Image: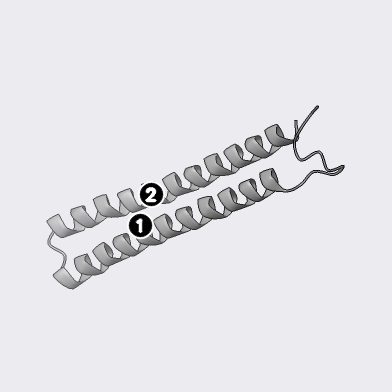
Amino acid sequence: MRDLCHVTRFALHTLVGVGLFLVIGLAVLLLHVFTGLIEYSGVSKPVVHTFRSLEALLFASDVVCMVLFIGRETFLFIRELIRPRPGGNHGHTI
């Protein structure tokens, strides 16, 4: 039962992390579309370049945060699974 709680917590935290990644990814997509529209409308190249750079920076930071979050959750999950249980049965139910 204890392991099931850890698996459930890990799964829920991972789903929340993916959800946050998708929300920020959607913001990056909208910024990309907006940048395409202002580029098409004839806005100067430095402004378009600034928006493209912001788009790349936002996406890169989103990926880095996602990897760090999932890595941390995986580390905590594995640490809890291998931690000795009280009583010294080490996971054996017999």
Q: From the viewer's perspective, is residue 35 above or below residue 15?
A: below
**Residue 91 placement, left or right of 68:** right
Q: Which residue is mark 2?
A: 25
**Residue 74 placement, left or right of 3:** left
Q: Residue at x 50, y 57 (%)?
A: 68
The type of colouring in the image is one colour
Q: From the viewer's perspective, is residue 6 above or below residue 83?
A: above
Q: Residue at x 37, y 46 (%)?
A: 26
Q: Residue at x 25, y 50 (%)?
A: 33
Are the two marked residues, 2 and 1, in contact with CB atoms closer than 8 angstroms? yes
Across and down, in percent, residue 59 comes to: 35, 57
Circle 2 Cα neighbour tier, 10 Å, few/some/many (<14 / 14–19 / ≥20): some
Q: State the SS at label 1.
A: helix
Q: From the viewer's perspective, is residue 30 above or below residue 61?
A: above
Name the amino acid type tagged 1. Phe
Q: CA distance from mark 2 to mark 1?
A: 7 Å
**Residue 81 placement, left or right of 29:** right
Q: Residue at x 61, y 41 (%)?
A: 10
Q: State the SS at label 2.
A: helix
Q: Which residue is mark 1?
A: 59
**Residue 23 placement, left or right of 31:** right
